[in-house]
């Protein structure tokens, strides 16, 4: 069977996982209760999954512009996040040699000390909605997440949710493992002398998304 190439097919795979006989025809112009369910949940679950991890297939690099308005207080520069931004990956032209950590993301802006430069290089997770561009492992994870939501909403399907949860968890592990293989973490070593000056322990450290 060919990989799904639109949102309706992804939703219907979720229904197949639930062994539900009724199918959706459209979630853009829903008519049935089932289609309204897909219309309400599909994009929300898709965006949440994209935001949950720095997926390789959803990464995008862009120079984001400086906002002419200064922050209400403080001396940081304020840069405008892209309209399709869902999550941060790294800031700087080269994540290996020019990795920036001293910044804040507030609302629709990045606040950082960047010498009033007109633009800021950024890699981020984009709000990608073209199903044909999804990693197939991510698609299986999306199918599992939707099945959990649909199963909770369709009367009589509660008993199957444990199996669906196991399916979802298995594909989440596969997706994260493959993502890591194709984009391994960069290990950075902080000198003991510099670490001591900053009152932090030397050695390998992490900020939660990157190894520092």
Image: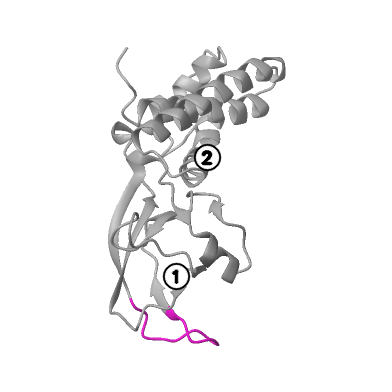
Query: Is residue 29 rendered to the left or right of residue 2?
Result: right
From what the image shows, is residue 194 above or below residue 45? below
Is residue 129 visible in the rendered image? The answer is no
Residue where numbered disc 1 is placed: 110
* Front-lying residue, 104 or 128: 104
Residue where numbered disc 2 is placed: 45
From what the image shows, is residue 78 above or below residue 60? below
Q: Residue furthest front?
A: 193
* Front-lying residue, 124 or 134: 124
Magenta-highlighted residues: 66-77
Q: Is residue 7 inside the magenta stretch? A: no
How far, Cα to Cα, is label 2 from label 1? 25 Å
The secondary element bearing badge 2 is classed as helix
The secondary element bearing badge 1 is classed as strand
Q: Residue at x 63, y 67 (%)?
A: 199
* Front-lying residue, 108 or 198: 198
């Amino acid at each position: 069977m060919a990989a799904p190439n639109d949102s309706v097919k992804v939703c219907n795979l979720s229904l197949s996982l639930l062994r539900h006989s009724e199918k959706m025809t459209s979630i853009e112009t829903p008519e049935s209760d089932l289609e309204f369910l897909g219309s309400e949940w599909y994009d929300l679950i898709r965006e949440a999954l994209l935001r949950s991890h720095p997926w390789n297939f959803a990464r995008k690099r862009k120079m984001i512009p400086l906002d002419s308005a200064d922050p209400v207080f403080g001396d940081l520069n304020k840069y405008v996040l892209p309209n399709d931004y869902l999550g941060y990956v790294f800031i700087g032209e080269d994540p290996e040699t020019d990795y920036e950590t001293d910044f804040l993301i507030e609302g629709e802006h990045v606040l950082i000390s960047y010498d009033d430069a007109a633009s800021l290089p950024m890699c981020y997770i984009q709000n990608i909605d073209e199903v044909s561009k999804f990693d197939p492992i991510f698609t299986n994870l999306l199918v599992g997440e939707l099945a959990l939501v649909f199963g909770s909403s369709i009367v009589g399907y509660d008993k199957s949710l444990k199996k669906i949860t196991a399916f979802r968890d298995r594909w989440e592990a596969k997706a994260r493992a493959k993502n890591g293989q194709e984009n391994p973490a960069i290990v950075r070593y902080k000198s003991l002398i510099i670490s001591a000056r900053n009152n932090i322990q030397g050695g390998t450290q992490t900020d939660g998304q990157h190894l520092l």
